Image (tube, grey):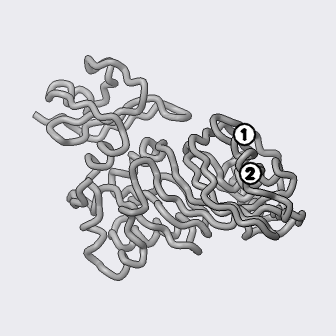
Amino acid sequence: MSPRRRAAVGGPEGVLVVDKPAGMTSHDVVDRVRRLAGTGRVGHTGTLDPAATGVLVCCLGRATRLAAPLQAGTKLYAAVVHLGVTTDSDDLDGAVLTRTPATHLEEATVCGALGAFRGEQLQVPPMVSAVRIGGRRLHEIAREGGEVERPARRVRIDDLVLDRFTPGEPAEVSLLVGCSAGTFVRSLARDLGAALGTGGALASLRRLANGPFLVEDAVPLADLEADPGLLARRLLPVEDAVRAALPVVEVDADVARRMATGATPDRAGLPAPGVVTAYLHAGSLVAVHGPGRDAPVRVVWATSGAG
């Protein structure tokens, strides 16, 4: 993906991959990007906890319409888990609930336990999370001292690799986690500790990738603030972003005109997509269509097709 800027009426338009620092919410980062870009139209493709760092994909201008389809890609995390402790937030920022000796744990035992967490599974989200229950976010309820029943959600962990094991009190486990959108690594830490009989809590988390967007290509927020021209140089055109993240179908001018005015693929003479798909004509995005995780995705990008 070449970091070219695409001009747009009303401000910059495209996708910016930010390396989020610790100590800020994802919303804080979006606010900073809004000020730097001079536009209120900025969103992101997946929340990172304040203590977490790494890839936060920000969508600017009309690209905010693409946040949902760009969010669906596999996430890759580097995580450190402490075994022998549980907290009310499932990470070390929370209040300690229990401490259990973990000096007996061995690397082979931990490796054996990890196998149960690979593949599709049901996962209960942390009480301190942005999941909505009854119209309220869980972290809002938790801040008031409340706790509610959280229904388990189906998630998928494709890759779960033990990178390092350090015995002790607590025992420390470094993991590489490749998972679906909506997976909570804090819940994985909690559940791994429960499986080992010691309890567990997340000590640190860094997102290494969100779909095709890699931490190596992310720009630190501090660099953006230090160099006023850097945002424009690192802004990806929407076409580059969707080509990297989604299957692409090139369409002719007639199909482009029909899709640009709202026609679905089957009404435009194309097979209905089985996955979220981007449709381009002459190198320009026309529309995004397809089944999403919870609802069909339908983004009409242009107001008229290219001739």
- The percent position of residue 107, horizontal first and vertical second, equals 73, 56
- The percent position of residue 142, horizontal first and vertical second, equals 78, 61
Regarding residue 8, the answer to whether it shows in the image is no
Find disc 1 in the rendering and name its residue. Answer: 116
Q: Secondary structure at mark 2?
A: helix
> Label 1 amino acid?
Ala
| On screen, residue 188 above or below 261 | below
| Quarter of the rendering occupied by the C terminus | top left
> Label 2 amino acid?
Ala
- The percent position of residue 37, horizontal first and vertical second, equals 33, 69
| Quarter of the figure with residue 222 | bottom left
Q: Secondary structure at mark 1?
A: helix
CA gap between label 1 and label 2 equals 14 Å
Name the residue: 36% across, 75% down: 224
Find disc 2 in the rendering and name its residue. Answer: 108
| On screen, residue 117 above or below 37 | above
Q: Residues within 10 Å of mark 1 (few under 14, many from 20)?
A: few
- The percent position of residue 67, horizontal first and vertical second, equals 43, 48
Name the residue: 70% across, 46% down: 114
Q: Earlier in the sequence, mark 1 or mark 2?
A: 2
- 157 or 97, nearer to the observer: 157
